[in-house]
Amino acid sequence: MKQGIHPEYVDCTVKCSCGNTFQTRSTKPELKIDICNVCHPFYTGQQRFVDTGGRVQRFADKFGAAKETVAEREAAKKAARAAAIAEVEAKKKAEREAKAAEKAKRAEEFAKKSEAEAKKAAEAEAAAETAPEATAEEAAAVDALVEEAPAAE
């Protein structure tokens, strides 16, 4: 063994929570334990609950509230996520409605334009129908002038 690196090995008094004490050797002069061979259920043959100093209650007090805190925190996160999702959905809905309104506006403008073109076409057609009559009259007048012109020569 190397010199100077090992702790002192001394006589030790072990005290149990049931009141039993015994001597052994350890690196510490005194040890306090919760359970020993006198009070352990395996050695005594009887099952008993050993709760020295209310350890179970202290644990429940310390970490029992943590469960509620974690549950509240998770509920808050869930609510925040739901609110964010609702906000995104509302934004998408507003965009869809704006796009539909724009599309309806374009459709209305197209309908007006089509109607105006139909009116122009109807007017042009009506003008075309009246134009041949005027042209026939003009042709008759021109023919009459042409017939008079050779007779005058």
Image (cartoon, rainbow, N blue to C red):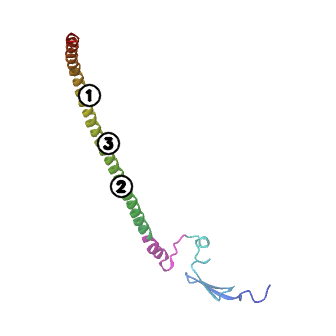
Marked residue nearer the N-terminal end (3 or 2):
2
Q: Which picture quadrant has residue 136?
A: top left
Look at discs 1 and 2 and give the one toward the viewer.
Answer: 1
Counting from the top left corner in percent of width and height, residue 21 is at 61, 85
Please provide the residue range marked out in magenta.
47-65
For the residue pair 78 and 98, the one nearer the viewer reads as 98
The residue wearing badge 1 is 121
| Separation of residues labelled 1 and 2 (CA atoms) | 52 Å
Q: Position of residue 80 (x, y in %)?
A: 38, 61
Name the secondary structure under disc 1. helix
- The quadrant of the image that shows the C terminus is top left
From the top left corner, tell me how far across and down residue 41 is, in percent.
Answer: 58, 71
- Label 2: state its secondary structure: helix
C-alpha span from label 1 to label 3: 26 Å
In this rendered view, identify the residue nearer to me: 111 or 10: 111
Image coords of residue 90 (percent x, y): 34, 53
Report, in whole angstroms, how far the alpha carbon at label 3 lies from the one at label 2: 25 Å
For disc 2, the marked residue is 86
Do residues under tags 1 and 2 come within 8 Å of each other at their CB atoms?
no
Residue 60 on the magenta span: yes
Amino acid on which the number 3 mark rests in the picture: Lys
